Amino acid sequence: MSESPRVRRVADRVREVVAGLLTGRIKDPRLGFVTITDVRVTGDLHHATIFYTVLGDDTARAETAAALASARGLIRSEVGKALGLRLTPSLEFQLDELPEGVHRIEDALREAAAHDAAIASLAAGASYAGSPDPYKHSPSEDVAPDEEPAADEEQSGETSADSGQTGDSGDGAASGSPN
């Protein structure tokens, strides 16, 4: 189900306010280089999930999470003033896993490309185990147009047609029937 335009506007406004607070008003030394990547607001506007990324290692992420948790009340009150809604949404900060997922996918693609290059280099010097054309062809395709079929092929065709007649005298009467 898609979100309404009002929910999208509220989410955009929450993103602007939180980003402004993180760059200007909140002076926590634990707060790292934070980027707000997305904000999702529920349809009833009671809850907002704020996705963020942090530049740095796991300790920088943990310290930033602690700084955001301690500043949640201040951020919520400023969001409430900026929105002017009857109810201020509760805020939840969640580390965005998208950049790590992108790095894993890029690493997998690089590994697959290296594997494909190795297979292509092996295939470049390889030869066929049998004939280059593995498909069966009819005998008429194998014979060149100026060659005639061998005498053995003509005789085998005649004998197979003649061998189908057994016990038939040729006049249509059966040999062992009483008159």
Image (cartoon, grey):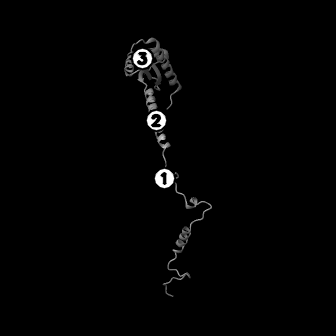
At which x and y percent is residue 45?
46, 23
Please tell me whether mark 1 sits on a helix, a strand or a loop.
loop
Contact between marks 2 and 1 (CB within 8 A): the answer is no
Circle 2 crowding by C-alpha within 10 Å: few under 14, some 14–19, many from 20: few
Residue at mark 1: 130
Please tell me whether mark 3 sits on a helix, a strand or a loop.
loop
Does label 3 or label 1 sit earlier along the sequence? 3
Q: Residue at x 51, y 21 (%)?
A: 12
Contact between marks 3 and 1 (CB within 8 A): the answer is no
At which x and y percent is residue 114?
46, 35
Where on the picture, by quarter, is residue 26? top left
Please name the amino acid that badge 2 sits on: Ala
- Residue 34 appears in the picture as rendered: yes
Q: Nearest the camera: 87 or 92?
A: 92
User: Residue 165 shows which numbered tag?
Assistant: none
**Count of residue discs:** 3
Above or below, comparing residue 83 to residue 153 in the picture: above
Please name the amino acid that badge 1 sits on: Gly
Residue at mark 2: 114
For the residues labelled 3 and 2, the Cα–Cα distance comes to 36 Å
- Residue 46 appears in the picture as rendered: no
Q: Nearest the camera: 139 or 104?
A: 139
Above or below, comparing residue 82 to residue 149 in the picture: above
Contact between marks 3 and 2 (CB within 8 A): the answer is no
Residue at mark 3: 32
Above or below, comparing residue 170 to residue 63 in the picture: below
Q: Residue furthest bottom?
A: 179
Circle 1 crowding by C-alpha within 10 Å: few under 14, some 14–19, many from 20: few
Please name the amino acid that badge 3 sits on: Gly
